[in-house]
Image: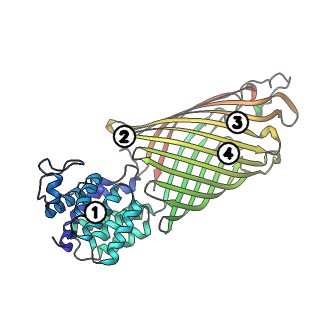
Amino acid sequence: MKTPQILTALFPLIFTLPALANTNLSEPEQKIKVATPKKAEQAVAPLGQNALPMNITEEDLKNNPTLTQQLLIQAIYARDAQLIEKLLAVYKTFPENDRLLVQFAEAKHAAFSGELSQAIRVYREMLAERADLNPVRIELAIALFQDKQNTAATEQFQKALSDPATPAPVQQLINAYLEALQERDAWQISASAYYVRDTNVNNTGDSRNIEQTGYVKNDDMMPQTAHGIAYNFSLGKDFNLGNRYYLAFENELFGKSYWDNHDYDDIYNRTSLGLRYKTAQSTLSLMPFYEKHWYGGESYQWANGARLELNHWLNPNWQLSTAAEYSKQRYFDNQAQNGNTKLVSATLVWARTPRQFFYLGGDFNRETTRVKQYGSDTKSLRLGWGQEWSKGISSRLGFGFSQRHYKDEAVLGGLIALGKVRKDRIFNVNLTLWKRDWHVFGITPKLQFSYRKQKSNIPTLYSYDRQNLNLIFEKSF
């Protein structure tokens, strides 16, 4: 079989890619699964996993170049990296082997083994010699897609489409990839809102007495009730700068507005602009940011800093996410709290099946302030479980525990010495339920129960518990 015939026959192999997609692809990327694998004609018995057909020995291969070539093509179709390696070692010993088939097999072996950079290099070498090898160009585009080189992948897919010899089914698959690339590069927007009834909006203890000081709280220091709307809005976009490099923009807005107690209206916004480096398994981000916090309708605090993040898939089922952040914070009315914060965080996710995942995470946050009593160290532990049930029901359950230790003896209002260094323990539980096929104008309703309990060694001021049941309306664009 001559080289052009071999590579034309390899067009069906392109259809094996949807089955090759990693389990960690985002939802838009799953659209590449629209194509149905097309079975190649087999001149010999089907291959077993990592094994030759039972009636064929290695000696048979060494004495039959045609048979070895046919089996090598089948091994590529079967996406069997180990068998490709075995057959390729034999095939390369033949003096009249097909060099382009050898290169193609080497590139596919690299791609199946997760060595995308090696696969991309070999495909480009083949195209440099024979620019008319459209099947190779498509495989190059697929490898670039998996390696998150969006601009280069789009260019190669579009070139492949321009070839009139490209079969219609392959054109459909290419168009599915191009659509996935458009969604991958599109603005990512999400929003949610829900009604809030908070019986302790100021997060304070319900005792009138302030410890053993002899002072008594006035009404404003007692738990306050408020009714309103909580909301959040986020948008972001990654602009491909070439190869695996991206300019990343993000903005996150969270807020609560109480129509009967505006003194506790709370708005927080963070804007980030930085660089990202992406591969098939990892995303590394360096994101400088500016944030501002409004409270009670007035400017309360602002900060700027930078966040370094690394998300890496250890294998198709395990992901490790880490982050480190530094920020300088300034308060408009209380300069005693001016200072900086340092945060480190790590989360391990186990995607046990497509319908179930678990996570375990830990955080350490250090806040250093001008007046030491406002500074603190906070250690946190998080764990959770996500599940897709039958009849379209989904659930997310999360638990959290934190210990926060302050740096100096607490003095209330700068006047009342409380005689203790404040220490808090915080417990959180969140349960969210929704039905995956319930949508109203693209908006998904979710029922969320949340519980928070804070136990402080200064209980009359800082110990409290709060529970809420909310109906959240959420939409992603």
Viewer-side label of 2, 1: 1
Q: Mark number for residue 105?
A: 1
Near-viewer residue (52 or 131): 52
Near-viewer residue (57 or 473): 57
> How would you rate the neighbour count of disc 2 (Cα within 10 Å): few for under 14, some for 14-19, many for 20 or more?
few
Asked if one can make out residue 107 in the rendered structure from this viewpoint, the answer is: yes
Q: Secondary structure at mark 3?
A: loop
Q: Is residue 252 left or right of residue 215?
A: left
Q: Give the distance between the C-alpha atoms of the residues marked 2 and 3, in whole angstroms.
A: 39 Å
Viewer-side label of 4, 1: 1
Label count reads 4
> How would you rate the neighbour count of disc 4 (Cα within 10 Å): few for under 14, some for 14-19, many for 20 or more?
many
Hey, what amino acid is under mark 2?
Arg
Q: Mark number for residue 76?
A: none
Q: Which residue is mark 3?
A: 202
Q: Secondary structure at mark 4?
A: loop
Mark earlier in primary sequence (4, 2): 4
Mark earlier in primary sequence (2, 3): 3
Near-viewer residue (375 or 67): 67
Q: Give the distance between the C-alpha atoms of the residues marked 4 and 2, in whole angstroms.
A: 38 Å
Q: Which residue is mark 2?
A: 355
> How would you rate the neighbour count of disc 1 (Cα within 10 Å): few for under 14, some for 14-19, many for 20 or more?
many
User: Residue at image x 77%, y 48%?
Assistant: 339
The x and y percentages for residue 474 are: 48, 47
Q: Mark number for residue 265?
A: 4
Mark earlier in primary sequence (4, 1): 1
